Amino acid sequence: MKIKDLPCGCVPIRAIGLSVLTLVCVSSAFAQQSTAASSSLSPDQRADQLVKRMSLQDMHQLVQTYNTMGGQKMPDSIGTAGYVPALTKLAVPALQENDAGIGVQNYPTDLKKNGQPNHVRGEQGNTTPLPSTLGLAATWNPQIAYDGGRMIAGEAHAQGINVLLAGGINLTREPRSGRTFEYLGEDPLLASRIDGGEMRGIQSQHVISTIKHYALNDQETHRTTVSSDIDERAMRESDLLAFELAIEDGHPGSVMCGYNKVNGVWDCSNSHLLNDILKGDWKYPGWVMTDWGSDHGAMDAMAGVDQVSGIDPVSGLSLGTRFNSFGEPLLQAMAKGTVPRSRLQDMVHRILRSMYAVGLFEHPPVIKPLDVEADARVSQHAAEQAIVLLKNDQAQLPLQVGIKTIALIGGHADVGVLSGGGSAQVWPIGGPAIPAVKGPDWQWKVYDPSSPMKALQKLLPNAKMVYDDGSDSAKAAALAKSSDLAIVFATQWTCEGIDQPDLALPDKQDGLIDAVAAANPHSVVVLENGGPVKMPWLSKVSVVVEAWYPGARGGEAIANVLAGKVNPSGRLPVTFPQNEQQLPRPVITNAQSVDYNIDGASVGYKWYDLKKLQPLFPFGFGLSYSKFGYSDLHVSSDGDHVTVSFKVTNLGSRAGMDTPQVYVGMLADSGEAPRRLAGFEKVPLQPGQSHAVTATIDPRLLATFDVQGHQWQVAAGSYPIHIGHSSRDFELNGKANVTAATIAP
Ligand code: BGC
């Protein structure tokens, strides 16, 4: 079917500026009709009724998404990454799908502004970036993730967007992956709780969230061709468990299948992943959309794909491919009988039931101005809880009020903070802090205009602050020498599509830090980075602050932590290795398959525990300006249900937040890594205050996956329970006596 034949039924736009308004009028009409229809029915019943009224052409339209970003306009598209025209006669609103998890990609205003996409020049954005998703995971606080999700979806909804391509949850098997910053670290429980929070927040605003990229899209090298090879048990206990738990928590309307292959079969042609596991075992009711151009033929429909994304409106082909699997090929397959009509009906049912479930019919986007001040506060709050204090010798932080001279070195700390590149890039309001630099492909290196230096100066008005760009180590060292304190802002730009060659800071920054540390014994390093980095200079500096990509108000968040206005409370969601030799795969393979059976289910800290390796910083680690203690451990069990309770107390003299972590030890003959994270809670505490924590452990976290029996299996035994400050620092230890049990897959 050609674009011009699409039964859109919408008024063609005359001027881009009017297109959004047109959308609103049409959507409001949909809202009235459909509310009258049947709000007492379940989303599935409503979808059933609607599917019965749809022609083949109607249904066919809903399973194809057009890529309208970059100015490829279609009637009523607002220029987002994905667009499905409305079915006006059936009152089905258009889908306007936009990236994503860190904030709203800024295509709509770009188009409204001048009729041409200007995001490539990056002059102006109009939305608020959160800290990187890895930073959100470092908060260990699902409520922060919820608030962030609600904020970005509010901004989306106010611009005509009703689907956010968010929810990235690929586990950090490969810390050099260019998208590590878009994901949630290495542990299925932590990642799923944060993802679940964010997706619930997004969908609370009547914007559908995806979860992506299903599954094992864990590196960018050869991402569209590489096969992630792993056995069933290992993937069920690791990467897939993260998806399973997050879907249960967040109920995302859609799952995006990835570009890569798993065990030789494309993610989006993988009936085992999609039909057997996602829709079969997990009973996922929503729809599966492809990543942009990750479709591989009409038979993807039989493998479980419900919608092809990224079709070019001009060529009619899906992004970067020579076909559009669900265009003519799908119609031909239906004519031949290889894809039955009932399958197309199911595909459409799944899309519609998510639209009903999230409220797209009753709550169409309403275009309105954004409260960017309030939204920036949400982002700053997240960044403040995301920052991890990794080292603080002689309690050098918080900075003393009487400090006279501070050298700020590198990282454009005079004007901004770094962000990650690729489809998650959010162009900042007011434009980047310095002109954006083009990446090797379509990516851009962008600094958010939030100056750590200006924010610090406000907090320490009597200190003299001098900025040096760090390009000349000797010059920076001389400045450091003549200052009371030197702060080096070290950056590592990462982006979608490109992996890091190693774990080193780029651009000779290790040498810069060495030189500064040699010149001034009071040297602080603030990291703005995509994922774990090596720190050959660690013993020479007195403070290390991990700030990730800290988002719209990152400068303020960093300054508040340095000056003690905020007590740092972030904990690492990923292990920081000493070097690449400690990784399961010291070198990223250039081959067309990557062997994940090396680490199997032992991702991240589990690998270091299994191999008895001492990392640079362990998973779960993070310091505070206060000190917290644990006491009164009680462990009770009823069959395979274990409940752990204990007390956490603020033993220091400052208010702060702690995140006590519950780890469960695996039985010696289980064949598993020694321990798994089984619970956590982020707790605010005044000095001297205590709080009772209770954690109920999901039995799947005690279990192994029995492939033959097709079920989770909990072995009877006495399971060690540890309450700790990180995966390597336990304060309380107990045992849980568990009886044998099986759990449906
Ligand atoms: C990315 C997706 C993204 C899509 C649309 C792809 O390149 O892998 O995560 O949602 O583009 O922008």
Image (tube, grey):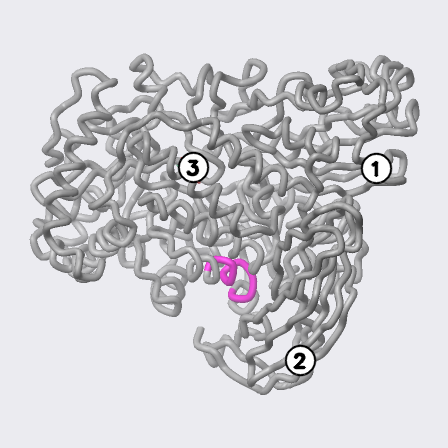
**Mark 1 or 3: the one toward you:** 3
Does ligand 1 reach within 8 Å of label 2's beta carbon? no
Query: For the residue carrying disc 3, how many other residues have a C-alpha within 10 Å: few (<14), some (14-19), or many (20+)?
Result: many
Q: Earlier in the sequence, mark 2 or mark 3?
A: 3
Callout 2 amino acid: Ala
Q: Nearer the viewer, residue 295 or 239?
A: 239
Q: Are marks 2 and 3 in contact (CB under 8 Å)?
A: no
* One can see residue 611 in this view: no
Q: Is residue 148 left or right of residue 328?
A: right
Question: In 3D space, how far apart are the residues under numbered discs 1 and 2 (Cα atoms)?
Answer: 41 Å
Does ligand 1 reach within 8 Å of label 3's beta carbon? no
Q: Are marks 1 and 3 in contact (CB under 8 Å)?
A: no
Q: Which residues are magenta?
A: 236-243
Question: In 3D space, how far apart are the residues under numbered discs 2 and 3 (Cα atoms)?
Answer: 41 Å
Q: Earlier in the sequence, mark 1 or mark 2?
A: 1
Q: Nearer the viewer, residue 604 or 150?
A: 150
- The residue identified by callout 1 is 536
* One can see residue 378 in this view: yes
Helix, strand or loop: magenta stretch: helix
Callout 3 amino acid: Ile
Q: Nearer the viewer, residue 344 or 73?
A: 73
Give the numbered dot on residue 736.
2
Residue 29 position in % (x across, y down): 12, 38
Give the numbered dot on residue 152.
3
Q: Is 147 one of the magenta-colored residues? A: no
Callout 1 amino acid: Pro
Residue 683 position in % (x across, y down): 64, 55
